[in-house]
Image (cartoon, rainbow, N blue to C red):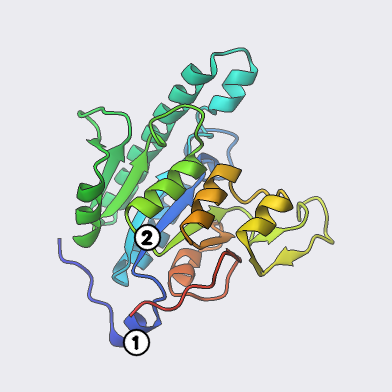
């Protein structure tokens, strides 16, 4: 695959060299109540392709809540470990769907699973993942960490640090972090920037506390932004002021 060669002006504007995008499983539902929306898949793939075309190395992690959520299964009386493993398998289904959407657009993609299933995905190998990124391929990390009791938020933080990502892009359905639910409270205030401790102390629902703590311990910035607005992934990787930044504002990459 020929790695995109961005123009000089775009290359200078890019704030990041390598990013990890965290998608929720619910993001794939579109307007539906469950499952995968083909229209939404293509929209996400097109947005990610815009970043890849700039020469940015892009990895993704994906949740499985649109198919099965481990915590919900546990609350219904199912063994928590079994429920979490089922949730991990759901993320593999989502990862395969995303891979198909990317490759229809001509973007080479690899799915790496933390649970080995050689017929459909590569096993997660850190050095191989980095090599794929260096070759201009999108890498989708599926099956969480491969362990129960850890969320896909934690998996996203862990993988981002393992591949030396410059930032974790947390894609949501709102345009940043608020002090209250903006859909229920029109007076909710949006934060432009937060420290990791602010998120933990105020119990803001950015990511779970384990994921936030991992990012804090390793100075990994998080950008929370609205995935539903087309072009926002490109804006985020170029360092435009969208959403909310958690942690230090990163300097532009050389």
> What secondary structure is found at the residue carrying circle 2?
loop
Relative height, residue 124 to residue 57 (above, below):
above
Q: Is residue 208 visible?
A: no
Q: Position of residue 236 (x, y in %)?
A: 48, 68
Q: Position of residue 163 (x, y in %)?
A: 32, 54
Structural distance between the alpha carbons of marks 2 and 1: 22 Å
Q: Residues within 10 Å of mark 1 (few under 14, many from 20)?
A: few
Find disc 2 in the rendering and name its residue: 165
Q: Looking at the image, which residue is at 56% across and 64% down?
A: 247
**Is residue 11 left or right of 61 when viewed as pictured?**
left
Contact between labelled residues 1 and 2, with CB atoms less than 8 Å apart: no
Q: Is residue 177 visible?
A: yes
Q: Position of residue 225 (x, y in %)?
A: 57, 61
**Is residue 146 left or right of 80 when viewed as pictured?**
left
Which residue is at the front of the view, 172 or 71? 71
Q: Which mark is residue 135?
A: none
Q: Nearer the viewer, mark 2 or mark 1?
A: 2
Q: Quadrant of the C terminus?
A: bottom left
Q: Looking at the image, which residue is at 37% across and 66% down?
A: 51
Relative height, residue 52 to residue 239 (above, below):
above
Find disc 1 in the rendering and name its residue: 9
> What secondary structure is found at the residue carrying circle 1?
helix
Q: Looking at the image, which residue is at 78% across and 64% down?
A: 189
Total numbered labels placed on residues in the image: 2
Q: Quadrant of the N terminus?
A: bottom left
Q: Looking at the image, which residue is at 33% across and 38% down?
A: 96
């Amino acid at each position: 695959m020929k790695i995109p060669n961005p123009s000089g002006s775009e290359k200078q504007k890019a704030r990041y060299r390598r990013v990890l995008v965290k998608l929720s499983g619910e993001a794939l539902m579109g307007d539906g109540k469950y499952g995968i929306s083909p229209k939404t898949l293509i929209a996400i793939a097109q947005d990610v392709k815009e970043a890849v075309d700039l020469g940015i190395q892009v990895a993704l992690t994906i949740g499985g809540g649109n198919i099965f959520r481990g915590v919900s299964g546990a609350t219904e009386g199912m063994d928590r470990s079994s429920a979490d493993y089922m949730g991990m398998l759901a993320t593999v289904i989502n990862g395969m769907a995303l891979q198909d959407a990317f490759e229809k657009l001509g973007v080479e993609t690899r799915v790496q699973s933390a649970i080995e299933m050689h017929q459909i995905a590569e096993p997660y190998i850190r050095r191989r993942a980095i090599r794929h990124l260096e070759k201009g391929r999108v890498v989708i990390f599926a099956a969480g960490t491969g362990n129960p009791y850890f969320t896909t938020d934690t998996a996203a933080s862990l993988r981002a640090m393992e591949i030396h990502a410059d930032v974790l892009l947390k894609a949501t359905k709102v345009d940043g972090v608020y002090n209250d639910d903006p859909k229920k409270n029109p007076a909710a205030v949006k934060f432009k920037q937060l420290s990791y401790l602010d998120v933990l102390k105020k119990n803001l629902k950015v990511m779970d506390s384990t994921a936030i703590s991992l990012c804090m311990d390793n100075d990994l910035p998080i950008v929370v932004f609205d995935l539903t607005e087309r072009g926002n992934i490109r804006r985020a990787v170029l360092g435009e002021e969208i959403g909310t930044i958690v942690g230090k504002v990163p300097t532009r990459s050389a």
